[in-house]
Image (cartoon, helix red, strand yellow):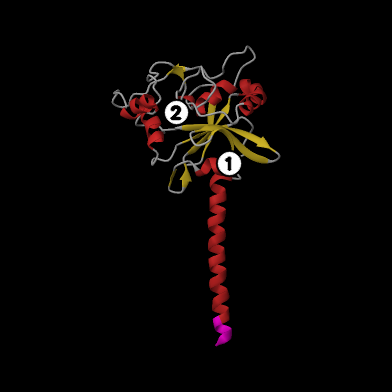
Amino acid sequence: MILNIFRNYISITTIIASFILLIFMFNCCSYSDNTFKYQNGDLLFSVGSSDSEFTSAIQESTSNKDEIPYSHVGIVFLENDEIFVIEATTKGGVIKSTLEEFFAEAADIDGKKLIAVGRLIPELRYTISDALKAASTHLGKEYDYFYDERNDSFYCSELVRFSFIDSTGNHIFEPLEMSFKNKESGESDPFWETHFQKLNASVPEGEPGTNPADMAKLQVINIIHTFF
């Protein structure tokens, strides 16, 4: 009797342990994906969580209805066999995150993270080393809530734009005319009006800038992998 109870206990314990291990392996695979090898300078485009009003406003003003609404981008930095992401975030300004931390902030669907990997076209990959050095010099700087290229703070795609410079001293990622209007309706977005009012600044409609959704479509990079 006691032996049977013990055997059942061992069986149940083994099942539970196996289940926990599977969950752990699944969570690890969701960001490490052993079939994919990151390279220095890869750009990670992510869809932010929809429960953030700030993220939702970015998505509504930069993405069309039938597009993947990327709202964030970071730069892959390999160091001592570890994978980091240099990124500009509203929470911490310009920081160096672990890959796990970056993935944790992205939205998911059916257990898959809404993240894509962009890689510079071969003829521009010579810029990566200097880009990583440039991005690293901005660590600790504040997030650019003004979306102004003339100050010394950065939003996510602005950090990417100012880090990658070609041999002639020009930015690889050309600026676009920013719009803070709803992409579908074309009307002013109340969120952005309130946002800039709090900063005592005008909405920089039409000013030069970037955003992750448009950056992901530029011809200087190729989307080579998605996790969804």
Q: Is mark 2 on a helix, strand or loop?
A: helix
Quadrant of residue 122 within the rendered picture: top right
Q: Which residue is drawn at 71% across and 39% down?
A: 80
| Residue occupied by mark 1 | 99
Q: Is mark 1 on a helix, strand or loop?
A: helix
Extreme-top residue of the structure? 168
Alpha carbons under labels 1 and 2: distance apart: 21 Å
Q: Which one is nearer the viewer's eye here, 109 or 199?
A: 199
Given the image, on which type of amino acid does mark 1 rest? Leu
Against 113, residue 65 (above or below) is above
Q: Where is residue 98 in the image (x, y as percent from the top left)?
A: 59, 41
Residue 183 in view of the camera: no
Instruction: Please say whether residue 2 is one of the residues in the magenta stretch.
Output: yes
Quadrant in which the N terminus is drawn: bottom right
Span shown in magenta: 1-5
Q: Which one is nearer the viewer's eye here, 92 or 158?
A: 92
Q: Is residue 63 left or right of residue 30?
A: left
Q: Which residue is drawn at 54% across and 28% down?
A: 222
Q: Where is residue 11 in the image (x, y as percent from the top left)?
A: 56, 73
For the residues carrying marks 1 and 2, which lies nearer the camera in this image? Answer: 1
Against 210, residue 59 (above or below) is below
Against 167, residue 227 (above or below) is below
Q: Where is residue 23 in the image (x, y as percent from the top left)?
A: 53, 56
Extreme-bottom residue of the structure? 1
Given the image, on which type of amino acid does mark 2 rest? Ala
Instruction: Please say whether residue 53 is one of the residues in the magenta stretch.
Output: no
